[in-house]
Image (cartoon, helix red, strand yellow):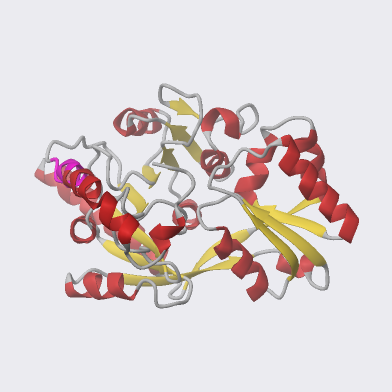
Amino acid sequence: MVSEAPPFWWEPAGVQSALLSPFGWVYGRVARRIMDHRERKAVPVPVICVGNFTVGGSGKTPTALALADTAIARGFKPGFLSRGYGGGVRHATVVDPARDTARLVGDEPMLLAAKAMTVVSANRVEGAELLVESGADLIIMDDGFQSARLVFDQALLVVDARRGVGNGCVFPAGPVRAPIIDQVRHANALIVVGEGKGADAMIRLAARAAKPIHLARLQPRNAAQFLNRNCLAFAAIGDPEKFFATLEQAHVLLARCQGFPDHHPFTDDEINDLLSESELYGLDLITTEKDHVRLQAGHGRALDLIKKTAVLKIDMIFDSPEVPDAIIDAAVVAFKRRRTSA
């Protein structure tokens, strides 16, 4: 998958999408075959997979963190399973927040590891087995919905209410990872994040398939400290506009916003530009938690940028507070059922 989504993915399907549609058809057929693969590996603990329809940010990681919070409060020892992005790990590895960096294991795993035990593995079966060996009694997968060869006890699809699924076309004609109807068929529930009408079609599909639909939103935890301060916000995530909108909804004054591609490694020139503009116009720098951990893996001016940049911390808040408990309960019930029938 590409890290920088072409703009036409998020516009009504046009000539570019049509030209790439044959490749999307082939990609979709392969994705469908993988998702329908019957010989999945079962592990001896409940598995919850948090995925999304499309390439790019929708709220998977905040959802996974929210589920872990609930699991920990209930006495579980959850473990996160992530493929990582751009890291150099070849075999299943337990992330050590004190030793590892985003450059080695990926930025999202570093965020997850601050909450609970996290394993990075391209082979998710191998990663899940390592989590079990390391003492996890509940696995929460951050991504892997379309490709993992694991048995899921709950499979969740997260969709952004504003962007939805873009033009609805399968990669590379659009941002969709597999035919939408197949994704809905394999999901246990839909989680709609934020406000907007972009996800309305997905909500209708899920409703017709009798899938539970949960509403949620991203809520800043520390926005009060940025009130009445002129800020320069920057982000290199799947949807920088979502971050900027979250700041505006929290009444943060944004003098300028600078978006970069997802997982973007900041260059010295880009860092210098951010620092210079901040100093020239007297703007406070603010970024995401994910960008902050990625900058920590840098050197030189990246460390200077970290020192001068504040981090907006966010939580995933469900409209119905009992939803995380219900998801975990459903996973445990499904796990016990498959263990009994095995």
Say whether residue 31 is magenta.
yes
Left or right? Give the position of 94 relative to 191: right
Residue 149 position, x and y percent, is: 23, 37
Say which residue appears at 35% left-offset and 63% top-offset: 165
Say which residue appears at 82% left-offset and 53% top-offset: 277
> Foreground residue, 24 or 239?
24
Residue 31 position, x and y percent, is: 21, 44
> Foreground residue, 318 or 241?
241
Q: Is residue 113 above or below residue 130?
A: below
Q: Quadrant of the C terminus?
A: top left
Secondary structure mainly formed by the magenta segment: helix
Residue 186 position, x and y percent, is: 20, 55
Q: Quadrant of the N terminus?
A: top left
Residue 47 position, x and y percent, is: 31, 46
Residue 267 sits in quarter: top right
Q: Is residue 89 above or below residue 220?
A: above
Outermost residue, top direction?
Answer: 90
> Foreground residue, 78 or 280?
280
Whether residue 67 appears in this view of the structure is: no
> Foreground residue, 226 or 9?
9
Q: Is residue 22 above or below residue 168?
A: above
Say whether residue 50 is magenta.
no
Residue interval drawn in magenta: 30-37
Residue 265 sits in quarter: top right
